[in-house]
Amino acid sequence: MSSKLLTLIVLVSISFALPAHSAEEKPEKDSLDFLDNIDYPELQVVPRASERLDVEAQYEREGGSWWNQWTFILPGIATLTAATLTGSALGAGIAPYQQSAVQFGQLVGVATLGIGIYYAVAQPYVAGFDRVKKSRGPGKRAMLMRERLAEEALEKPAAQIGSLEAVSVFSNFIANGILASYQTSTQYSLTAMLIAALPLIFPNPYVTNWDRQKEYKHKIYTPLPTSSISTDPYTGETKHYAGLFWTW
């Protein structure tokens, strides 16, 4: 009897001597394991956001950032030229309101041109890709982090440039419309108006790149509506059921 009691005391002592894991550590580890075993559309889309960002960043490094901003640079030059030529054609007898219109056209042209030059020099894709490269680590959780950072790097310039482009089209169109009403060098103002409207037909590449990436991602998981009919075995009543599940 004494030997059994001694054994029990030894076992209890060992159990208290073993290191205890805090309750806070286990949920964290479980959550990481859970994330590492889940598939996400960000990781399944082809090309991934990081891959597209890498390709577009390389294009910017090769000088493509200037071509990407033609929707600002070309209308800006056209409006600035039309305003300057109109001012020269009106000559010394230009009225104050005409002078104000010419200055407004020049201001709009310079601002539009400046926006294009700023984004061409800033190279938003290159800056975004550099941030993505700084996020490292193994496992799907780290991969998901990089993909979402890449998506943000694609989305941010698209949102900014899309909004600025809308303002640019409106401002350039109005400025050239006012200049064309003076019946002096009208051909330049009308041409500039047409150039200002081109972004409505040919969207900025930053906008189209983000739209395509979203389209590819949405094709991974698509909601599919379903319906079924069943008969109650006891009452004989026919019932209709509707459902929605995700498929790919």
Image: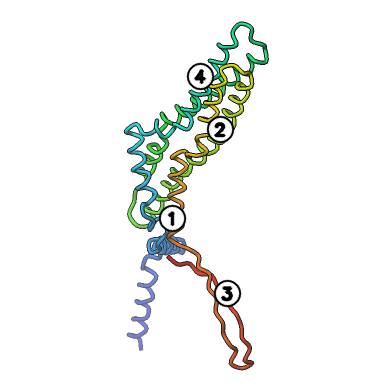
Residue in the image at 50% along x and 36% along y: 199
Please state which of residues 24 and 97 is positioned toward the viewer in this rendering.
97
Q: Which residue is mark 3?
A: 242
Counting residues from the N terminus, which is met first, the one under dot 4 or under dot 1? 4
Quadrant where the C terminus sits is bottom left
Indicate the colouring scheme.
Answer: rainbow
**Residue, disc 4:** 81
CA gap, disc 1 and disc 2: 30 Å
In the rendered image, the vertical position of residue 52 relative to residue 192, given as above or below: below
Residues at discs 2 and 4 in contact (Cβ within 8 Å): no
The local crowd at label 3, few if under 14, some if 14 to 19, many if 20 or more residues have their Cα within 10 Å, is few
Mark 4 and mark 1: Cα distance apart in space: 43 Å
Q: CA distance from mark 1 to mark 3?
A: 26 Å
Residues 5 and 139: in front is 139
Which residue was labeled with disc 1?
217
Work out how far the residue at label 3 is from the one at label 2, CA to CA, in angstroms: 47 Å
Contact (Cβ within 8 Å) of mark 4 with mark 1? no
Image location of residue 55, percent across then percent down: 34, 43
Q: Amino acid at mark 1?
A: Lys
- Residue 162 place in picture, x, y as percent: 52, 39
* Figure quadrant of residue 2: bottom left
Q: Earlier in the sequence, mark 2 or mark 4?
A: 4
Q: Residue at x 39, y 70 (%)?
A: 16
- Give the structural element (helix, strand or loop) at label 2: helix
Q: CA distance from mark 4 to mark 3?
A: 62 Å
- The residue at which mark 2 appears reads as 169
Q: Nearer the viewer, residue 155 or 188?
A: 188
Q: Amino acid at mark 3?
A: Ala
Query: What is the x, y in percent for residue 94?
Result: 64, 10
The amino acid pointed to by label 4 is: Thr
Mark 1 vs mark 2: in front: 2
